[in-house]
Amino acid sequence: MSSQEQLLVVSHYETLTEARRRRLVARVVPVGRGVGVRVVAEYQRRIDDEEGAQRWEPEAREQHAEEAQRWELAVAREAERRFHRRR
């Protein structure tokens, strides 16, 4: 994407268990005359491949959609609240 469409992308991993983690991807995007925050949560599970190496694979969104949406909304609201407080 061009810089006009997407101003900043941040990715962060949070360990939930030894075999499961949550990835947060936050994007600051232009909205009208200002900017907004778009947040996506992706849950991943550690699996062993055929050679015995471990890798992370995304879980189906349907398995955790409600939890992900609550977390995405909370992160986006907090980011916007902090932004407006500093203006």
Image: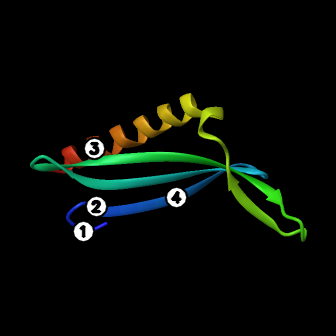
Mark number, residue 81 = none
Q: Position of residue 71 (x, y in %)?
A: 49, 37
What amino acid does circle 2 point to?
Gln
Q: Residues within 10 Å of mark 3 (few under 14, many from 20)?
A: few
Q: Secondary structure at mark 2?
A: loop
Counting other residues with Cα less than 10 Å from the Cα at mark 4, is it few (<14), some (14-19), or many (20 or more)? few
Q: Earlier in the sequence, mark 3 or mark 1?
A: 1
Q: Give the CA distance from mark 1 to mark 2.
A: 5 Å
Residues at marks 1 and 2 touching, judged by CB atoms closer than 8 Å: yes
- Of badges 2 and 3, the one in the foreground is 2
- Which residue is label 3 attached to? 80
Horizontally, residue 36 falls left or right of residue 18, namely left
Instruction: Name the N-terminal-most of marks 4 and 1.
Output: 1
Estimate the spatial distance between the alpha carbons at disc 3 and disc 1, rounded to whole Å.
20 Å
Q: Earlier in the sequence, mark 2 or mark 4?
A: 2
Q: Which residue is mark 1?
A: 3
- Residue assigned mark 4: 12
- The vertical placement of 8 against 20, above or below, is below
Tell me which amino acid carries mark 4.
His
**Mark 2 burial class by Cα count in 10 Å: few <14, some 14-19, many 20+:** few
In the picture of the structure, the residue carrying the numbered disc 2 is 6
